[in-house]
Amino acid sequence: MSDQPRMKRNIRCLPMLALAGACLTLGLSIAFSGARAGEGMADTSQSQVRRLTESQYRTSIADLFGPDIKIAGRFEPDLRIDGLQAVGTSAVSVTPAGLEQYEQIARAIAAQVTDEAHRGRLVGCAPDARDIGGAQCARHFIDRVGLRLYRRPLRASESQWLVDSTLASAVTLKDFHAALAATLTGMLTSPDFLFRVDRPASSGRTIDPWSAATRLSFLLWNAPPDDALLADAAGGQLDTAEGRAKVVDRMMASPRFAHGVQAFFSDYLQLDGMDELAKDTLLYPAFTPSVASAAKEQTLRTISWLLVDRKGDYRDLFTTPFIAMNRTLGPIYDVPVARPEWYMHEFPRAMRAPDC
């Protein structure tokens, strides 16, 4: 048998095998059901500290400032423990070299946020005759951005210190927006942003609502809390089982839930390794970096389509004849693809490999 037919047959099996393996540890279903009304929150008095992954950092910036803010620079590699970056985040710190990298990235972000092209939308104010020196504008920006970056309201002392620092820098630099950029750089390199910290509630037996909102958000969305979830935390909706159930239902109905599901499976299946996958082009001429990238997206799109869009049973991943398809992958599967966009392709029974 030639290598090319074998390659096509093996690649046809790969997505199904990947999907089937992913089903074995789908712990998300347990987490979701545990938030239903009538069930108490587990004892979470043991605090946890987790560093943001590169993906979570990028999502945090895009959610707050928009996708047009560029994030340039290298991040320290994420650590895997027991095969999961989600576990490794609790065992990593920031090295001196890593802190320098974070600072360079933060400076570039802050410069964009406060430049003339973005400051009108992202800062939203400027010193004027009614706000000489810019104290009110600085406080408005710092409190609003601080809530989203730190995933909790700033304490009064924190807010005042940041405002005072901004005003002092503005005098030295003779530029209010340059001073605001310096303050934002500091906030972006703060442990309060770079690390997710579980803070105990006043009772000491559970975490506070802001920590609960952060846990839920990164579990279900792999992203920081949005304004609605932060409002839920402030309003006490996360303090009761019934309130948490309603919040979780809303979060699972959000388009962001698909992103969270894809992030879980990408981590579990270690799909980031596809970016470095290489094949001998003489033996596998059809394999290219574009094919590897498309195969990664194909797996995630298929999982999301079945579990989120169709609200299917994850066991169906073992047997589903449907798979995401595009022009890049069509030739690998002997499937003619005319449309330019991704679509869900159903294999006829005669084309399904018997041992997949």
Image (tube, rainbow, N blue to C red):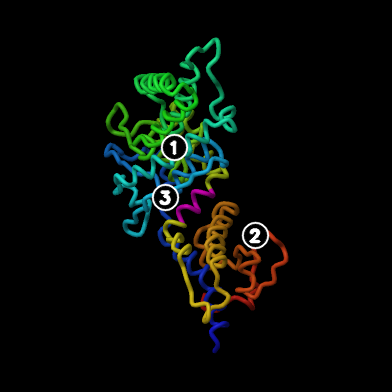
Disc 1 versus disc 2: nearer the observer: 1
The residue at which mark 3 appears reads as 74
Q: Which residue is mark 1?
A: 107
Whether tag 1 and tag 2 are in contact, CB under 8 A, the answer is: no
The answer to which image quadrant residue 321 occupies is: bottom right
Q: Residue 37 falls in which quadrant of the image?
A: top left
Magenta-drawn segment: 258-265
Q: Amino acid at mark 1?
A: Arg
Q: Nearer the viewer, residue 67 or 341?
A: 67
* 10 Å crowding of disc 1: few (<14), some (14-19), many (20+): many
Q: Tell me if residue 175 comes above or below residue 345 in the rendering.
A: above
**Secondary structure mainly formed by the magenta segment:** helix
Residue 67 in the figure: left or right of residue 95: right
Give how far across and how far down residue 273 sits, in percent. 44, 63
User: Hey, what amino acid is under mark 3?
Assistant: Arg
3D distance between C-alphas at marks 2 and 3: 31 Å
Cβ atoms under marks 3 and 1 closer than 8 Å:
no
User: How far apart, in angstroms, are the residues tagged by discs 1 and 2?
Assistant: 37 Å
Q: Which of the two discs, 2 and 3, labels the residue nearer the N terminus? A: 3
Image depth: mark 2 or mark 3 in front: 3
Farthest residue to the bottom: give it: 1
Residue 47 in percent (x, y) is at 28, 38
Q: Tell me what residue is drawn at x 51 percent, y 78 percent.
A: 355
Query: What label does residue 342 carry, if any?
Result: 2
The answer to whether residue 235 is visible is: no
Q: Percent x, y for residue 327?
A: 66, 66
The kind of residue tagged 2 is Trp
